[in-house]
Image (cartoon, rainbow, N blue to C red):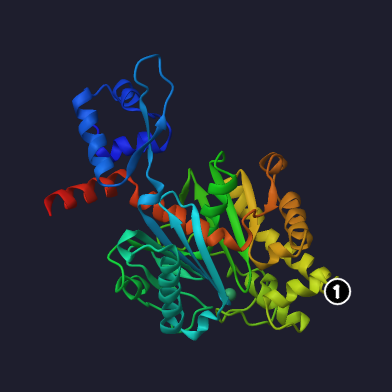
Amino acid sequence: MLTAGQILQLIRNGSCRTRKELIEHTGLSRSTITERVDRLIAAGYIHESGVGASGGGRPPSVLDVHAASRLILVADLGATHARVALTDLTARPMAEEHADMRIELGPEAVLSWVREAFQRMLDRAGRPARDVCGIGLDVPGSVDHASGHVIRSFLMPGWDDHPVREAIGESYDVPILVENDANAMALGEWWSSWRGTAALVLVKVSTGIGAGIVLDGRIHRGVEDAAGNIGHVRLSETDDRVCTCGSRGCVASLASGQALAADLGAGSSREVVKLVQAGDPDAIARVQEAGHTLGVVLATAVSLLNPGVLVLSGDMARTGEHYLTGIRESVYRRSLPYTTRNLPIVTGTLGERAGIVGMAVLVMEHVLSAAAVDAALAAAEAG
Ligand SMILES: [Zn+2]
């Protein structure tokens, strides 16, 4: 017997649009379907919108997710920027804010800005905090998915083991998801442009390097939440530049925005982008070479996962084709032709918004999952 939460999935994925279709699709009785649908409507998950096609008589009302009934708050925290968004229950953006911010300021300063920005967006939308049903934050480091603690980031001094979830949860009694930024961006790009593909790999190259993997529509995190942590694969035994991880010869110490900035005498990854955009020949050559170097590692990822698309995101995606060209040359040359024959290697379509889009989708999928909906209905009906 399908639960109300499972009925909701049939409505969400478009399998059933009316009560009649639910009865036909599930084989459940009219009274059971009516009871499930009425509970979902009463709890604000769905509403009746417009009218469907009818074979005569009273036209049936169409059931749809009630997008406006609840809100999602998300934050994307990079090494040098922060971006927040308010979305409806279907992850459609209603408001966004961004700021230049160095994550090394530490969790208190950064998270208090996030809390204030969340409140500003709610105030401007004229909505109370109790309308928020879920929150998501991504950070440029590894996160323990179960506890929401930052477990390791060379870009985030002072954040190790910080209870991000508790820090935000003081103000909101809702599920709070904490995620690695490249994972969030990968899900955002998959959702926006690549839902037809079963495997997507995204590589983010900004200050550091990280990758996110989406398999069958879900983030693949690995057993230690460390999947995609490709920045510290050691490529050179002889390079003497010290990486942020303390080792030498990592791909991050050769090909990250921070490494490029150091080589070119620029202040940051973003300044490297400006040099390339201004046509500086040294910067262009160095960026292309860096893409080439990272491509060596990505060729292995492509051979291992056989993705349907490889997406470049982060600051280096804004260098025009230069970083991308380097990646393409290495990946195509170092992989079996039939694994790359139909592999697009492209920049993301969401740009700097990939993280917040991915986080909003992640939160939406969590709060609208069958298990979460059934648990929430049971709790509301018990209390
Ligand atoms: Zn390293």
Left or right relative to 33: residue 287: right
Regarding residue 102, the answer to whether it shows in the image is yes
Regarding residue 250, the answer to whether it shows in the image is no
- Per the image, label 1 sits on a secondary structure element best described as loop
The vertical placement of 268 against 215, above or below, is below
For image coordinates 51% across by 83% down, the residue present is: 104
Q: Nearer the viewer, residue 379 or 200?
A: 379
Decide: few, some or many residues near mark 1? Use Cα within 10 Å; few <14, some 14-19, many ≥20.
Answer: few
The vertical placement of 32 against 131, above or below, is above
The vertical placement of 253 against 310, above or below, is below
Residue 319 at x, y percent in the picture: 75, 65
Q: Nearer the viewer, residue 215 or 30?
A: 30
Q: In what quadrant does ligand 1 lie?
A: bottom right
Left or right relative to 324: residue 358: left
Residue 285 at x, y percent in the picture: 83, 69
The residue wearing badge 1 is 280
Residue 198 at x, y percent in the picture: 53, 41
Task: Looking at this view, name the residue that lies furthest to the top.
Answer: 56
Q: Locate the C terminus by quadrant.
A: bottom left
Q: Locate the N terminus by quadrant.
A: top left
**Quarter where residue 40 is shown:** top left
Q: Nearer the viewer, residue 172 or 293?
A: 172
For image coordinates 12% across by 51% down, the residue present is: 382
Residue 376 at x, y percent in the picture: 23, 51
Q: Amino acid at mark 1?
A: Asp
